[in-house]
């Protein structure tokens, strides 16, 4: 028994991705002076107190510490999306490999159907 899969079109996928990115960017515009002390800032302060100077300065300085956390979370979400996509792809390929042999009578993608494809054994 073959079950139908519901799929989203590329437009819906790109729309959802745009919503996620907007949810990440809008708080930056609403509160650009946000401050949040993270582990990186604490480590930098501890090193500077010991007299160790930084080797270089950042090219682009985020407006606040929460911005760094937001960008890190966004990066993690995108990575999780790629991992989820890959796992779903592998699962669907494994499910397609387990299909019964009667699917072999269907024409293959990439070539036109011929009379031999529809011949009954």
Image: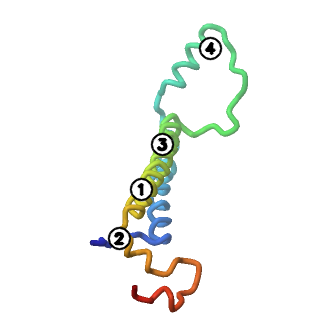
Which x, y percent locates residue 71? 52, 42
Crowding near the residue tagged with mark 3, few <14, some 14–19, many ≥20 C-alpha atoms within 10 Å: few
Q: Which residue does the numbered mark 3 point to in the structure image?
A: 76
Observer-nearest residue: 49 or 2? Answer: 2
Judge depth for marks 3 and 2 and give the one in front.
2
Residue at 51 percent across and 34 percent down: it is: 65
Which x, y percent locates residue 82? 49, 51
The secondary element bearing badge 2 is classed as loop
Residue farthest along the left direction in this orientation? 1
Closer to the N terminus: mark 3 or mark 2? 2
Q: Which residue does the numbered mark 1 point to in the structure image?
A: 88
Residue at 46 percent across and 72 percent down: it is: 9
Query: Which quarter of the rendering shows the N terminus?
Result: bottom left
Closer to the N terminus: mark 3 or mark 4? 4
Q: Which residue does the numbered mark 2 point to in the structure image?
A: 6
Closer to the N terminus: mark 1 or mark 2? 2
The secondary element bearing badge 3 is classed as helix
């Amino acid at each position: 028994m073959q079950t139908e899969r519901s799929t989203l079109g590329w437009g819906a996928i790109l729309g959802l991705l745009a919503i996620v990115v907007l949810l990440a960017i809008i708080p930056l515009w609403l509160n650009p002076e946000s401050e949040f002390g993270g582990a990186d800032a604490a480590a930098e302060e501890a090193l500077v107190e010991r007299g160790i100077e930084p080797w270089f300065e950042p090219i682009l300085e985020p407006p606040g510490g929460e911005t760094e956390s937001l960008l890190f979370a966004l990066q993690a979400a995108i990575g999780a999306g790629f991992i989820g996509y890959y796992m779903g792809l592998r699962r669907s390929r494994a499910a397609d490999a387990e299909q019964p042999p009667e699917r072999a009578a269907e024409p293959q993608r990439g070539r036109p159907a011929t009379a031999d494809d529809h011949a009954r054994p």
